[in-house]
Image (cartoon, helix red, strand yellow):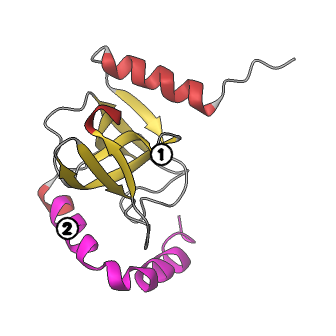
Amino acid sequence: MTNAISDHEIIQNAISLVREGLRVTFPVKGNSMLPFIIGGKESVDLVKPADLQVGHVVLAWVEGCRYVVHRVIRIEGEQVTLMGDGNIVGVEHCTLSDVAALAVNVVSRQGKHHNLYAPWRVKASRLWFRLLPIRRWILAVYRRVYLNFI
């Protein structure tokens, strides 16, 4: 008999702590936030979402079926559109109330915290969004060269 906790339970516990006003360091899986967050190697610091803006990275319940850590690309009234930085197609949708937490830092394996909203990161993420038509090729090179060395 194992006492393993499911991913969903871990996420729910993290959200509960964030709602209480605590900062939670949360591991990120997958490659959907490359090159800004490396899944399986980095984590994010999550806080209560406040004053949500385009460009913010959030933990949100999307499409009524799963949680993602992705970037806000549009807010229209209560509707929020998200897209992973490492994605080349597809977006997710949720409402403002489905945004469970705001990511404020990327945390390296060495425990270093890097502000997601430092001016250079904000400029880089805006440029990255504009590069969507050629992102596929940039990501392919990035995965082959950079990720093989870390």
Disc 2 residue type (three-letter): Arg
Q: Residues within 10 Å of mark 2 (few under 14, many from 20)?
A: few
Does residue 17 sit above or below 142 in this rendering?
A: above
Q: Which residue is mark 1?
A: 109
Q: Nearer the viewer, residue 76 or 9?
A: 76
Taking the magenta stretch, the answer to whether it contains residue 132 is: yes
Q: Quadrant of the N terminus?
A: top right
What segment is highlighted magenta in the picture?
A: 122-150
Residue at 24% x, 32% y: name it: 49
Task: Tell whether 89 sits left or right of 5.
Answer: left
Q: Position of residue 52 (x, y in %)?
A: 18, 41
In space, the residues marked 2 and 1 are separated at their CA atoms by: 26 Å
Q: Nearer the viewer, residue 139 or 98?
A: 98
Is residue 84 positioned above or below 42 on the image? below
Q: Residue at x 17, y 59 (%)?
A: 122
Q: Is residue 57 above or below residue 24?
A: below
- Quadrant in the rendering for residue 5: top right
Q: Which residue is mark 2?
A: 126
Which of the 4 image quadrants contains residue 17?
Answer: top left
Which residue type carries mark 1? Arg
Q: Secondary structure at mark 2?
A: helix
Residue 21 seen in this snapshot: yes
Residue 102, image x and y in percent?
28, 37
Q: Kindly identify the residue that appears in the image at 43 percent across and 71 percent down.
A: 89
